[in-house]
Image: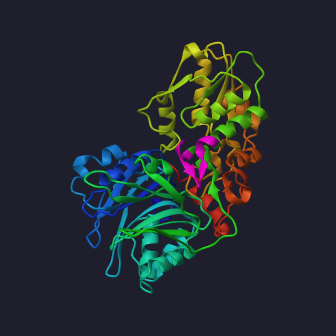
């Protein structure tokens, strides 16, 4: 999380974290980081970075703005050698992309040295930073990770035990986070906040070049382990620390408990890779169930109807809808593979300009049909309104919107790019009004009951704050202040 000025304007991000340890000290794991981050590219497209080392050797970092394929080019990482590494992809939500926003974040003092990668939002950032400044800590950026690093350094003065350090850190932080730390001795520590807002998993595989060696992996999503042909062996539990060390395997310890969980429902609806599992739950299966449930909730009566997904995240829900309603599924919108995901492009103007370039309509499939258009969500409505207009311009007889997520009405302070109610179409408008504003012939959203049933978790196990304003945070009193801070300061 990067904050753009001294008033602590937040730049929201949804990032991907990755860590790897190879038992063979002669192996270089930089290529594994590259492959893992390529698999996590959907979680952030603004910046990428890597930190590598061997036990008791210096940590070397390289990071920059851009896609993984551009940043981690062979000529950029050829000098990076080590059998222990971290990787990160970043999505910042304001049009401010600088290398200082990129991770891994490297921290070095007289007392402690480490690298860290972070996905999340620290809601009590301002309070923690002020307390650290009062103790003499000096900050050079407006980045959450710098506050976390200084907290670690402060705790390290009292204990050198990393499990105890992280436990104390968890008790101080409020918000959402999945973090991996690489210490100067070559240990990796991966952990999630006590509510489990952000996903984090682990697994392993064996190298095959010149003899087999075990490689242990920590990653935001299972798709990153799958990309390395590895085996997913578990998911980090909320409030749990997983420790990886050369030659010792993975060890876990639960250090902070919570009476509830709060896995972000939007991970299932939109952010996560379709092939991933989050806490053991298949994203693909959830999205299909969401679509099937929509077909039962809001059928379209027409013998001329076709089901059309908005690619890519609407595709699985569309399949579920088509199968449940016994209607044909047609790929009438073809995605331009060279255009990035418009929701996570920073800046509303950029999002608008990219919509027409992102999708190509197939006029022969569309003309004369009643289109049941399946999308994962409506946030600002930028993309949806353009698509409806595009379909009708290409001869659609009618367009019926079916949305696999319930209406998004409230800000997110846990790291997703809709922090003000003014930006949320469903916040101040009824379903009929939204339908009219988008130019659709009908509109139906998923229900809260259908969402939880499709995921297979209860309200006490999910964060649905953007849907129902139930924020499971300790920093409740600051939420209104946060929204006021964000309003009018976004680019």
Residue in the foreground of this view, choosing between 186 and 61: 186
Residue 182 shows up from this direction: yes
Q: Say left or right for 35 vs 294.
A: left
Q: How is the image coloured?
A: rainbow
Location of residue 475 (image quadrant): bottom right
User: Looking at this rendering, what residue extends furthest in the bottom direction?
Assistant: 158
Residue visible at 37% across and 45% down? 67
The percent coordinates of residue 238 (x first, y second) are 59, 65
Query: Is 272 part of what is drawn in magenta?
Result: yes
The percent coordinates of residue 108 (x first, y second) are 33, 74
Residue visible at 34% across and 57% down? 50
The percent coordinates of residue 486 (x first, y second) are 57, 56
Residue visible at 52% across and 41% down? 348
**Magenta part of the protein: which range?**
271-285
Q: Say left or right for 198 vs 21.
A: right
Residue in the foreground of this view, choosing between 367 and 82: 82
The percent coordinates of residue 226 (x first, y second) are 45, 47
Query: Is 302 part of what is drawn in magenta?
Result: no
Residue in the foreground of this view, choosing between 256 and 15: 256
- Counting the numbered discs, the total is 0
Vertical comparison of 302 with 230: above or below: above
Q: Say left or right for 56 vs 13.
A: left
Location of residue 284 (image quadrant): top right
Vertical comparison of 66 with 373: above or below: below
Residue 98 shows up from this direction: no
């Amino acid at each position: 999380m990067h904050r753009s000025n001294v008033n602590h304007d937040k730049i929201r991000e949804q990032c991907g974290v990755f860590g790897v340890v190879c038992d063979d000290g002669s192996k270089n794991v930089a290529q594994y980081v590259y492959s893992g981050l390529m698999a996590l590219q959907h979680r952030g497209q603004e910046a990428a970075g890597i930190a590598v080392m061997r036990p008791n050797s210096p940590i070397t970092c390289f990071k920059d703005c851009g896609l993984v394929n551009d940043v981690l080019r062979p000529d950029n990482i050829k000098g990076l050698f080590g059998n222990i590494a971290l990787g990160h992809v970043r999505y910042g939500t304001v049009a401010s992309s600088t290398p200082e926003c990129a991770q891994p974040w490297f921290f070095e003092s007289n007392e402690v040295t480490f690298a860290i990668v972070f996905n999340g939002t620290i809601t009590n950032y301002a309070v923690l930073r002020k307390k650290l400044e009062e103790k003499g800590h000096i900050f050079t950026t407006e980045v959450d990770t710098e506050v976390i690093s200084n907290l670690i350094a402060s705790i390290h003065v009292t204990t050198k035990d990393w499990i105890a350090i992280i436990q104390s850190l968890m008790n101080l932080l409020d918000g959402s986070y999945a973090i991996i730390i690489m210490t100067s001795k070559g240990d990796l520590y991966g952990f999630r906040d006590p509510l489990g807002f952000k996903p984090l998993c682990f697994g392993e595989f064996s190298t095959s070049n010149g003899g087999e060696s075990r490689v242990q992996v920590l990653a935001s999503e299972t798709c990153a382990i799958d990309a390395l042909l590895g085996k997913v062996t578990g998911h980090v539990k909320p409030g749990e620390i997983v420790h990886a060390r050369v030659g010792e395997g993975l060890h876990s310890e639960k250090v902070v408990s919570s009476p509830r969980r709060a896995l972000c429902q939007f991970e299932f609806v939109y952010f996560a890779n379709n092939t991933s599992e989050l806490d053991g739950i298949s994203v693909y299966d959830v999205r299909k169930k969401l679509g099937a449930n929509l077909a039962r909730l809001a059928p379209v009566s027409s013998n001329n109807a076709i089901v059309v997904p908005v690619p890519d995240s609407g595709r699985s829900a569309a399949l579920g809808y088509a199968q449940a309603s016994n209607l044909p599924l047609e790929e009438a919108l073809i995605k331009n593979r060279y255009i990035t995901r418009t929701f996570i492009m920073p800046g509303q103007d950029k999002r608008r300009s990219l919509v027409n370039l992102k999708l190509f309509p197939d006029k022969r499939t569309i003309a004369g049909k009643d289109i049941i258009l399946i999308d994962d969500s409506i946030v600002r409505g930028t993309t949806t309104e353009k698509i409806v207009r595009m379909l009708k311009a290409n001869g659609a007889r009618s367009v019926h919107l079916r949305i696999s997520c319930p209406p998004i009405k409230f800000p997110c302070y846990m790291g997703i790019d809709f922090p003000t109610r003014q930006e949320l179409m469903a916040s101040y408008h009824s379903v009929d009004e939204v339908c009219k504003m988008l130019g659709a012939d009908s509109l139906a959203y998923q229900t809260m009951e259908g969402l939880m049933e499709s995921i297979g978790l209860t309200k006490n196990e999910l964060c649905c704050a953007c849907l129902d304003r139930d924020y499971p945070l300790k920093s409740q009193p600051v939420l209104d202040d946060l929204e006021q801070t964000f309003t009018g300061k976004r680019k």
